[in-house]
Image (tube, rainbow, N blue to C red):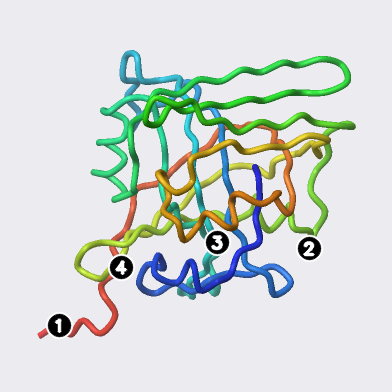
Amino acid sequence: MLNYEIDPEVLRPYLPAGTELDAWNGRTYVSMVAFLFLNTRVRGMAIPFHRNFEEINLRFYVRRRGPDGWQRGVVFVKEIVPRFAIAAMARLFYNENYVALPTRHKLEVSAESVMADYGWRLKGRWNRLRVKTTGSFKFVEPGSLEEFITEHYWGYAAQGDGGCVEYRVAHPAWPIWQTEEAGLDCDVDALYGDRFAAWLKAAPSSSFLAEGSEVTVLDGTKIKPVGTIRQ
């Protein structure tokens, strides 16, 4: 996870209805996240040749006041996966902005560190996100930026009618490693637009590698557009 402080005005056009930007210590962040899906099932069914694959996404952080208080969630600007069928299912079930591009990854694990290198090919060029850890893994400290980044358990996606889809993501707290190296080599303008270029081309504000876990994504619920009147 590579995390970048960003001007909140850059993100406001992407806010789904009913949500507001979430901030840590008054600062707004986007994150470039790369990870592996392993043993994936869709509604309990394993789809041949679509169980293990990479995903790379750009996300930011929001909150929405629900019946039991604030729900802290994420909004994805764009999500990259290697197969068209995966992207199509994600768009169908969650209305997320998935695209299919060739992807690859490399992991090197030793007693001293872990190196994770993820790549995706766009317009004939390989882009990459890479981190190398230092020290041992630990659980995040309460109130830290790492806790803010990892512990958002809802997803929100805007819909064309002005409403949005809300879904819950369940997983245990993730231990993390800090990094001694972190880098992003990406054609930001082509992938995300020039509004993100100045921020993602700078050095990240923070970076870390999180330990994986089982993750459950629950079915989405549609939230009606603000101002809808039922007769």
Q: Residue at x 39, y 70 (%)?
A: 13
Residue 118 locus on image (x, y percent): 57, 27
Q: Nearer the viewer, mark 4 or mark 3?
A: 3
Query: How far, Cα to Cα, is label 3 from label 1?
Result: 31 Å
Q: Looking at numbered disc 4 in the image, what kind of residue is underneath it?
A: Ile
Q: Amino acid at mark 2?
A: Gly
**Which circle, 3 or 1, is nearer the viewer?**
3
Q: Position of residue 152 (x, y in %)?
A: 58, 56
Residue drawn at x 49%, y 74% is 20
Residue picked out by circle 1: 230
Residue with the most extreme left position: 231
The answer to whether residue 110 is left or right of residue 77 is right
Q: Which mark is residue 202?
A: none
Kindly identify the residue that appears in the image at 41 percent across and 68 percent down.
15
Disc on res. 223: 4
Point out the tag, 3 or 1, that comes first from the N-terminus: 3
Kindly indicate whether the residue at mark 2 contacts the one at mark 3 (C-beta within 8 angstroms): no
Disc nearer the start of the sequence (3/2): 3
Rendering coords of residue 79 (x, y %): 42, 42
Q: Which of the image's four quarters has the N terminus? A: top right
Q: Which residue is mark 2?
A: 143
- Residue beneath disc 3: 61
Counting residues from the start of the chain, the first of labels 4 and 1 encountered is: 4
